[in-house]
Image (cartoon, grey):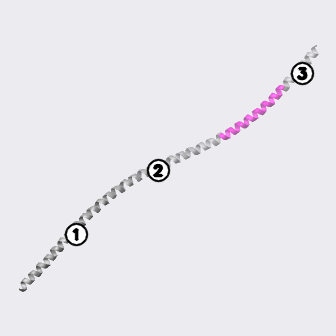
Amino acid sequence: VASLFAKNTLARLTKDLHVQTTMSETTKVEHQQLEQKHSRLEEKCSQLQSTIATMEKNMKENNDINDELAKTKRELASSKADSHFAKQTLAKLAKDIEAQTSVSQIKVSEYRKFEQQHMQDQQTLVALVKE
């Protein structure tokens, strides 16, 4: 009986050892798979950190570009206002010149009439002197 018990126990222990060995080998394979997965995840994390750094750099450059664009828009608005003021000033000067030209033309016309009258007066005077 003891020999049968020992045989059964040995068989049971051998079976348990085989199960544990199989489980141990499975655990080793799973452990290797997890290490490989961990390595791939670390690589992916490194790539993501690099991508984030690039994106942050691009965002800063975009902010700089947006700041420059805003500055240019303000300068353009200022230039437009200056241009509008210059146009108004030129229009006023053109009206002033037109008015002065008109006055000058009237004065030239009056001077010619005066000159013509003066010549007629001289001719009349010469004719009177001759008589």
Residue at 32% x, 57% y: name it: 88
Crowding at label 2, few (<14), some or many (≥20) Cα neighbours within 10 Å?
few
Q: Is 107 left or right of 55, judged from the image as shown?
A: left
Establish if 73 lies above or below 117. above
**Quadrant location, the C terminus:** bottom left
Label located before the other in sequence (2 or 1): 2
- Vertical order, 88 against 39 (above or below): below
Specify the amino acid type for callout 1.
Answer: Gln
Asked whether, in this view, residue 26 is left or right of residue 99, the answer is right
* Residue 43 highlighted magenta (yes or no): yes
Residue type indicated by callout 3: Ala
Where is mark 3, residue-wise?
11
The residue labelled by disc 1 is 105
Question: How many labels were placed on the picture?
Answer: 3
Q: Name the residue at the bottom extreme.
A: 130
64 and 91: which is toward the camera: 91
- Disc with the residue nearer the chain's start (3 vs 1): 3
Magenta region, residue range: 19-44
The amino acid pointed to by label 2 is Leu
Label 2 and label 3: CA atoms lie apart by 84 Å
Q: Which mark is residue 69?
A: 2
